Amino acid sequence: VTNISVTGYASPEGTSDYNARLSQERAEAFAGHLIEEYRLPAEIISIDWKGADWPGLADVLEGSDFHGREGVLDIINSIPGHDDKLRALAGLDGGAVYGRLLEEVFPSLRQVALDIRFTVSPEVLRAGRRLEAVRRAVSLIDQDRHMDAVTVLEPYSSHPDQWTLLCAPYGHP
């Protein structure tokens, strides 16, 4: 692991300052957990926070059948400013939509996102390619394509005849 980016988010209820602080604390706490629990060096971890996750709310609602979805999306996309958006949401359907958002949608926005960067050694890459070639060859053998299976496996052996012998019990001449 060469770098881990930890980004904290909050659901929109509360003030903009409160959500910024909450998302910061969430990111910092999770980064601390990674350092302590997995003994990761602190210098590979970067921390960011976004406050209220309005884009995340829009993403969740766009693919849902949430009652009042269109009104919420209209508010998110057309009203600037955190406090004005909240006021508009609270007024939808006499507050019923906001109540359902609080209960059904907002909890999923209280999160930490991770971006983990790592380096894979050449040996691991080669082993993965070999494993994938074996899987492909087995699939070809199952299709009675024995010579194709040998062709797939040949680059991974200094003795291609061993693959021919492997395929022979499955009907290869």
Image (cartoon, grey):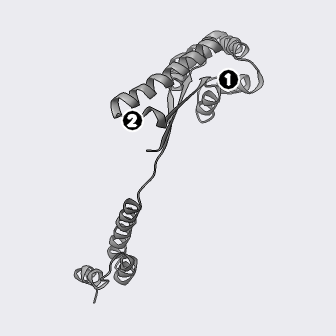
Q: Label 2, label 1: how many angstroms apart (C-alpha)?
A: 41 Å
Q: Which one is in front, 54 or 123?
A: 123
Q: Quadrant of the C terminus?
A: bottom left
Residue 25 in the image: above or below residue 126: above
Q: Residue at x 39, y 30 (%)?
A: 35
Residue at position x 39%, y 78% in the image: 155
Residue that carries the numbered disc 2 in the rendered image: 40
Look at mark 1 in the image and give the residue it sits on.
72
Please state which of residues 103 and 47 is positioned toward the viewer in this rendering.
47
Toward the bottom, the furthest residue is 173
Mark number, residue 154: none
Q: Residues within 10 Å of mark 2 (few under 14, many from 20)?
A: some
What amino acid is labelled 2 in the image? Leu
What type is the residue that disc 1 sits on?
Val
Choose the circle earlier in sequence order: 2 or 1: 2
Q: With respect to residue 119, does 157 lie above or below?
A: below
Is residue 14 shown above or below 146?
above
Q: Among all residues in the image, which is located at the extreme left?
A: 169
Instruction: Give the SS element for disc 1.
Output: helix
